[in-house]
Amino acid sequence: MRYFIEIAFHGAAYAGWQKQPFDITVQSVVEKALFTVFQSEVACVGAGRTDAGVHASFFVAHFDVKQYFDERQFIFKMNQLLPHDVSVIDVYPVNAEAHARFDAISRTYEYYITQQKDPFRLDRATYIKKLLSVDLMNQAAEVLLEFTNFKCFSKVNTQVHTYNCSIKQAYWEQKEHLLVFRIQADRFLRNMVRAIVGTLIELGLRKRSIDELRQIIKSENRSKAGKSMPAHALFLIDIVYPQNIKI
């Protein structure tokens, strides 16, 4: 029987979702808890990698087990076993062929910037003292929807078959001293969101123009784009699947 498990995690202590030989990851602690619950090895396949230090208020993975179980009891047990910075939100049966990664229709990230020194957002937002032009950054965000190849924002030496992504929305919102960048796409390249934010920040500081942004994207050259922003301010907040995936 295949199940989807919905998880939230604070990523500061982890080298991303995917298991690594020498680092602690979210996948490794989830699979350790699954082993304790089911008393056998249970592989868990995530919706994506997520970079080291990135958070997720909503993440999905799938796993297969032969026995039926009480879903509420499972959630309770898992949350007792998992570290304080990882929690299980929900679990439910899905079609046998359902895949947490390949069946995702879209993913949505948010990046947080504070324009005021805020001790309560030290680990959840990047502090930028200089005034940013939200109008310019929103104009730049709209340019992203004109393109599909985002190699210029991808981590170099990454093994992917294509650099094409379909961005469905990208915009900035200002909430008092907090700036929130939201971006939704069918898929994301490694480091893509943080590189996009770093580039848009340069436009917000009037260091680059809209035309330069178009040239950067067309160049497919990572060195021409802005710096990668810190991971601690990036959150995966939503993943959308076909409605008929649940049993």
Image: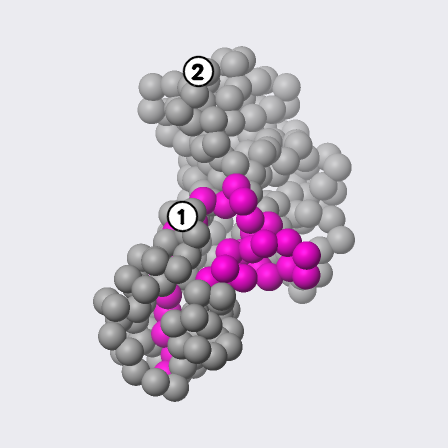
Give how far across and how far down residue 3 sits, in percent: 36, 74
Three-letter code for the amino acid on which mark 1 is drawn: His
Magenta stretch, residue numbers = 1-30
Image-based side of 204 in relation to 247, left or right:
right
Q: Which residue is mark 2?
A: 116
The quadrant of the picture occupied by the N terminus is bottom left
- The residue closer to the viewer here, 223 or 138, is 223
The quadrant in which residue 199 appears is top right
- The residue closer to the viewer here, 89 or 114, is 89
Image-based side of 157 in relation to 38, left or right:
right
Q: Is residue 183 above or below residue 87?
A: above
- The residue closer to the viewer here, 188 or 138, is 188
Which type of secondary structure does the marked residue at label 2 adopt? loop
| Residue 16 visible in the displayed image | yes
The quadrant of the picture occupied by the C terminus is bottom left
Could you say which disc has been placed on residue 84 in the image?
A: 1
Q: Is residue 14 magenta?
A: yes
